[in-house]
Image (cartoon, rainbow, N blue to C red):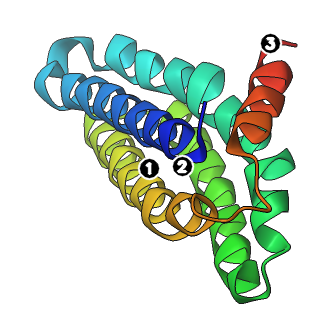
Amino acid sequence: MSNQEIAEAMRNHHALMAQQLHTLAGHVVTQKEEWGTARNEVGMYLTDDILPHAAAEELTIYRVAAQVDSMKGLIDSMLFEHGVIREIREELMGASMWEEAVTFSTEAAKLFEIHAEKENRFIIAVLEPRSDVDLASVLGDMHHLLSR
């Protein structure tokens, strides 16, 4: 597959992940009586999907991108955001009231949406046309890490 095809697949995957997290966070908002269950679903999605994806990115595409001098600051900010998402997940799982769960779940969804869009626009879009970057290999490495 070409870099263009891989980049499009990555962008589509980010969109699906953001939509799923947004949907789950919406359940926390709308299911006040069952907010604990809805909160746990958001926490599980963050733990089982979003955060492992973030960890795999840190070891693959972020390492490739960090080799481009102009991207080092951006990569530092992306790593910082991964830490913030982890912190929000902890706050969410410690929420003892519906209002707290609403706040933390919607924060997680919004931050991830912004984070994924930054990755799409400023990392993937920069790496995609580069002849010295093989996005198929990067994606293969990510899949390998996620399958462990």
Residue 90, position as x, y percentages in the image:
61, 41
Residue drawn where x is 37% and y is 11% of the image: 37
Check disc 2 and report the residue beneath it: 88
Q: Mark 2, mark 3: which one is toward the viewer?
A: 3
Q: Amino acid at mark 2?
A: Ile
Which quadrant, please, contains the C terminus? top right
Q: CA distance from mark 2 to mark 3?
A: 25 Å
Q: Nearer the viewer, residue 134 or 53?
A: 134
Which quadrant, please, contains the N terminus? top right
Residue 6: image tag: none
Check disc 1 and report the residue beneath it: 112
Q: Amino acid at mark 1?
A: Phe
Image position of 111 (left or right of 75): left
Query: Regarding mark 2 in the picture, which secondary structure is present there?
Result: helix
Check disc 3 and report the residue beneath it: 147
Q: Amino acid at mark 3?
A: Ser
